[in-house]
Each structure stands twice: as C-alpha cells, then as structure tokens.
Amino acid sequence: MIELESVAYSYGGGELLGDVSLSLSPGSFHFLTGPSGSGKTTLLKLCYGALVPSAGLVRLFGQDRRAMTRDDVAMARRRIGVVHQDCQFLDHLSVTENIALPLSVSGRDLLEEEPNLRELMGWVGLKERAHALPPELSGGERQRAALARAVIMSPDVVLADEPTGNVDWEMSQRLLRLLIELNRMGKTILIATHDLALIRAAKAHVQTRVLRIAARRLQFAGADL
C-alpha cells in the first residue's frame, strides 16, 4: 500500500533521514517512536505524499511519488487518513461541519452522507457535541474530532502523529481503543508516539510492529520496550 525503499530526506542542508525502508501492508498495525526531532513527523509526511524524498523511492498504492501529479497525490490522499499533531479546525464551523469538510472537498452529497456522519460522531463519542464550536472542545474532544475527520472518507490507511500527546492517560486509552477497532476493521494503522506506555498497552490487544528512528535510520524495536 505504502512503501519506502532506501529513502533519504534532507532539510536545511543536513540529512534528517537516511536509508529508510518501510512497507505498510494491508491490515498491519505499526508504532513509530524516537526522540523529539528525530524525524517521526517527516517520515509520516513521506508516507502520505506531502514530501518528496531526497533519495530513494516512495510508492503510494503502487505509484512512484516522484511521477505523481498534484491530482494523483490528491486521489491517493483520499485513501490515507491523517491525524495531525496540531489538529487544526475552522473555529467558525461546528464540530460536525469540520469533520465533514473532506466530504465537501471531494464533492460528496452531504445530505446522503448524513446518516454515516451521525454514526461516526457517535462512534467517537461526540454526538452530544455535534453543534459545539472547536474552541469549546476539550483536548480529548479535539483529538477524537481529528480522528473522525481523518476516517470520514473511509481510508485504507490511518497515520496518526502523537494523537495522545496532549491528553490524559484515560483519554489516551480511549483513542487507542478507537484505533485498534479501526485496525480490526481492516485498516492499516501507523502511530507516531513517544509514549512507550501506550505502545505496551496496545501490545496486549493487537499484534503490532514497533519501529524506532535512531541516528537518522529506521530500526525494528523488537521486544525491548
């Protein structure tokens, strides 16, 4: 689905990532860890086509990222849901309207999609907050809204960048359960996190592969967490 072969990425004249190879196969569950500034967010951006590698090959659903047009990337992105670390919303729109934005952009009929949207709001526990504005949301509610927006198009892959970074442990567990449920529905999941306790908690419920960025390289962390 998403493949990186001997990928390098340089920024500001220095190499941030080098010789990175990764394959996100259908239905797999991955964690990506490493110290702050090690390149976790950059690696995610390479995986969803926002960045072009300095060297090596990135394939999105069989297409070489370098050969893809802007429209090609936009079509591929419909199959990839992204939960950003700093989830941004339009403050003048309700939670529901923010979550539905990808549908509007892709030209879907919102009236037809309304039942699915209501079901999704219930799934993330935001049905009672449907008409709230983003500034009225707690940190956990914002993260659940961000997850709902990322999966509204029913993507094949979900990439989450520190989705539990600004919430307490109870909310972290709730978000993790939602991501595990998505995986059980057949979605490929990649979560970038520095929270090793979250990774250990996930290992009790789902088969995961843990990757670590160290010294600009991607390593398999194995069982030493």
Image (cartoon, helix red, strand yellow):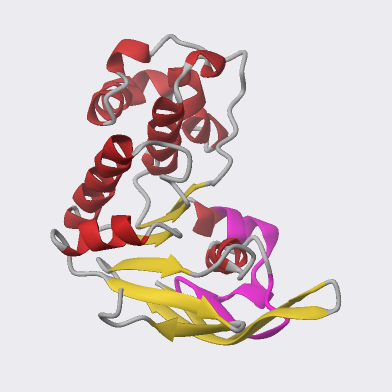
Q: Residue at left 41%, top 45%?
A: 164
Residue 197: within the magenta? Answer: no
Q: Is residue 88 visible?
A: yes
Q: Find residue 199 and report its image quarter.
A: bottom left
Q: Quadrant of the N terminus?
A: bottom left
Nearest the camera: 41 or 158?
A: 41
In the rendered structure, the answer to whether residue 223 lies left or right of residue 95 reads left
- Give coordinates of residue 15: x percent, y percent: 74, 81
Q: Residue at left 86%, top 78%?
A: 13
Q: Which residues are drawn in magenta?
A: 52-74
- Give coordinates of residue 219: x percent, y percent: 44, 85
How many marks do you count on the picture? 0
In the rendered structure, the answer to whether residue 114 lies left or right of residue 94 reads left
Q: Is residue 25 visible?
A: no
Nearest the camera: 16 or 113?
A: 16
- Give coordinates of residue 65: x percent, y percent: 61, 73
Q: Quadrant of the C terminus?
A: bottom left
Q: Find residue 135 and report its image quarter.
A: top right
Q: Find residue 146 and report its image quarter.
A: top left
Q: Residue at left 48%, top 39%?
A: 166
Task: Judge whether 216 appears above or below 72 on screen.
Answer: below
Residue furthest toward the left? 205
Task: Judge whether 76 appears above or below 91 on screen.
Answer: below
- Give coordinates of residue 144: x percent, y percent: 38, 33
